[in-house]
Amino acid sequence: MYFVDKERLLDKILTYKHFGDDGKGGITRYALSKEDLMARDEFKRRMENIGCDVYSDDLANMYAVLKGNGKSDKRIVMASHCDSVKNGGNYDGILGVLSAMEVLETVATQNIEHDHDLVAMIWTNEEGSLYPPAIMCSSIVTNSYLPEEIRKNYDLDKLLNSHSVIDKNVTFKMALDKFPYKGKIENRINPKDYMAMFELHIEQGPILEENKKDVGVVPCVLGMCNFSIKTEGVANHAGTTPMKKRKDALFAMAKVLLLIHEKLDKFDGLVYTTGEISIHPNVHTVIPDECVMSLDARHVDDKVIDEVKNILNNLPSTIEGCKVSTKLEWDRKTTYFHKTLVGYVEGACKELGYNYQFINSGAGHDAQFAAYMLPTTMIFVPSKDGRSHCDEEYSDIEHCYKACNVLLNAVLRTDEKGV
Amino acid sequence: MYFVDKERLLDKILTYKHFGDDGKGGITRYALSKEDLMARDEFKRRMENIGCDVYSDDLANMYAVLKGNGKSDKRIVMASHCDSVKNGGNYDGILGVLSAMEVLETVATQNIEHDHDLVAMIWTNEEGSLYPPAIMCSSIVTNSYLPEEIRKNYDLDKLLNSHSVIDKNVTFKMALDKFPYKGKIENRINPKDYMAMFELHIEQGPILEENKKDVGVVPCVLGMCNFSIKTEGVANHAGTTPMKKRKDALFAMAKVLLLIHEKLDKFDGLVYTTGEISIHPNVHTVIPDECVMSLDARHVDDKVIDEVKNILNNLPSTIEGCKVSTKLEWDRKTTYFHKTLVGYVEGACKELGYNYQFINSGAGHDAQFAAYMLPTTMIFVPSKDGRSHCDEEYSDIEHCYKACNVLLNAVLRTDEKGV
């Protein structure tokens, strides 16, 4: 077994905290921002220090290549992202990049022989916080490999022309054209030159911590469906409309929400979220005539997602006098990772004597799109209190170290045994 | 009995539809806008035509005075507003102004003898749509007569410096300084020179229509209380947080809303509205950690409002793991109109043989503030389908005509008998 350098890994974590420090313990590091640039410069500096060839592609996805012994012309890549949400944490995404760097530094400094080129990679704009949507650049690179049902949601032109949520005059493409790490399209990761991909990431949930596990072995990313739910009533004056004459769209939506909980709570392992709501006219003296709410539901079993869709499509058409309607905005099936690679990760956990468990990814990641192009898998690190996308996001250095060791050994096993 | 001219009244209604026509059947006529100016110009033109002295005060409240025979130096005023909400209707407010004009035109053209000066008046900015809050200028004029509990909500400086909701660089005072009908402060209505006030207004609710009544006699404006209700949970990732670990502020608020309905629906005659809601962060992939909702409750009996406050102040402190808190934003007791004037309105209905009923005003009006300064009352006109503040707002000309006759005869009775 091989081991990375815990001190060096921690040093990187502490260094990267400065690139977008929000002064409250977390960071704001939008894609293509000057903070993102600082993160990239440091990546380049450290990787060139150990003899890597560093370059980027037309989307500013960035690659550091540590040459192998020449016995294979295929590459093994470890990738994640270095952008964050607004007031996000110091681990989401970046820990995967820093672990990839740490693996290359370990291989280089310990002179570990390897047949394949090993690559540390940064995906641009995973969060989509400034330029929506999330997982943007991996959806572009892997686009032609995606199943039609997913690809239809990712129009390449629309993605490139995504407007900044802060300044509507700026598009992703405009920011990219000015970004120093915009490179050539022929540098993009592809299935001809690459054999396998690993993404180490924080869990962003409470399960590993609760089960006192060191590492999560990730067999899949959950399938999901997204609905918008609408109730339509009649707007009227708060003071002059008797209660019995009202058609209150917000009251109807509250009843819809309780009904949804009643019907969906019976499915084991299902997670569903109603995170967005808007009402019209949203004036305290007017009975609302329209309410729209989002629903996001995720489960490993596509049949359960089908049942959820069936329930949403068959809600009562009228509640509290208001018309109720639902619309499936999009859905996707569960994405399974490559069994051989999942096995290498589990094998590394076992050989290292770590306490691990299998855990499905409820969140979306670049790896889930990469999986349609290349053999891919993920490794999860426990998140303190399950918190993520906030200043409090935290993963213990012991857990980061162990997961990084699993990554190192799984990559070396892939190098040795192939996929 | 005396009768106004139905054709002339209708002509005014049809004329005023042009001043802010929104092309969809209704109007947008913000206070101090060019549309408001058109309405004022027409008021001045028509009132001067019948020999009125027309002038305005420092808030652009506008007065048309038809001289009496000199036997009394007190005035009787009929007042309402000519501004509207965005895409409002052709009756709210303006019908009271047009009816006041029609009464003066009738008295003038029929040479009806009267001891007191009779005044048609326009209150500026009742709706507060462009410069919040509503009922602004009557709250300023009557400020020193208001009970402390109401006055504390109306800071004169803050009112004058209210910012336009469309252009934050413009304040009410700035618009007023440019408005051609800004006059002198000494012209303001006051209890020394004025004996009584009437406001004719549409009901804005469905009660008169449902009860097949021609006219509403209004003894009071309902007391009310306004609360904000907050639920606080924990924000977490939609995909990675098991259902049992969630503290969902929106789900908690849905339960609060149902609980409120359960507890408040037992009060006869109570109307309550939850018209405004906001959640944080309002992102479809994040469990909401905060939800704030408004509650507006109105009832004629102040004891019932006290019971509502008691219920709101004693909601469970925790629902679905979320902290629940409520805050009384403001309240006011029921405002009773002057019994003698209410009696004159009822007397006129009876003598005219109209089908009338007593009806409390659920909405706020300029008359409710005026009532603290002068003997005041209101007359209600049925609203088709109870609709108001919308393009569909409508009152039949027969109903407008009858209410205007009631106004004319009640004013003449006041002129004859005093208050």
Image (cartoon, coloured by chain):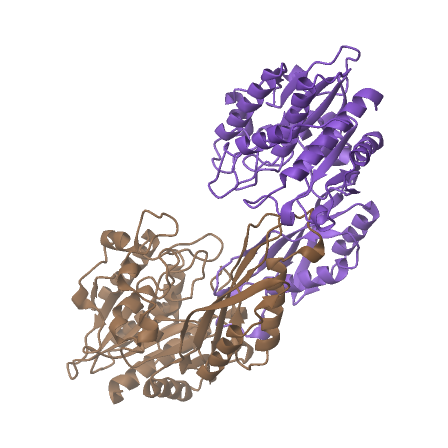
Chain colours: A purple, B brown
Which one is in front, B152 or A84? A84
Q: Residue at x 63, y 54 (%)?
A: A293
Q: Residue B206: tell me if it is visible.
A: no
**Seen in the image, is B383 located left or right of residue B100?**
right
Quadrant housing the N terminus of chain A: top right
Taking depth in this image into account, of A94 and B246 the one nearest to the observer is A94
Q: How many marks?
A: 0
Q: Which quarter of the figure is the C terminus of chain A placed in?
A: top right
Q: Quadrant of residue B415?
A: bottom left
Q: Left or right: B86 with respect to A39? A: left
Q: Position of residue A13 (x, y in %)?
A: 58, 33
Q: Position of residue A108 (x, y in %)?
A: 67, 18
For residue A88, above or below residue A105 = below
The extreme top residue here reads A70
Q: Position of residue B384 (x, y in %)?
A: 52, 70
Q: Is residue B60 visible?
A: yes
Res. B11 image quadrant: bottom left
Q: Which residue is drawn at the image coordinates 66% and 65% (left, top)?
A: A255
On screen, residue A121 above or below A284: above
Percent from the top left, x then y, of residue B3?
Answer: 35, 79
Towards the viewer: B267 or A178: A178
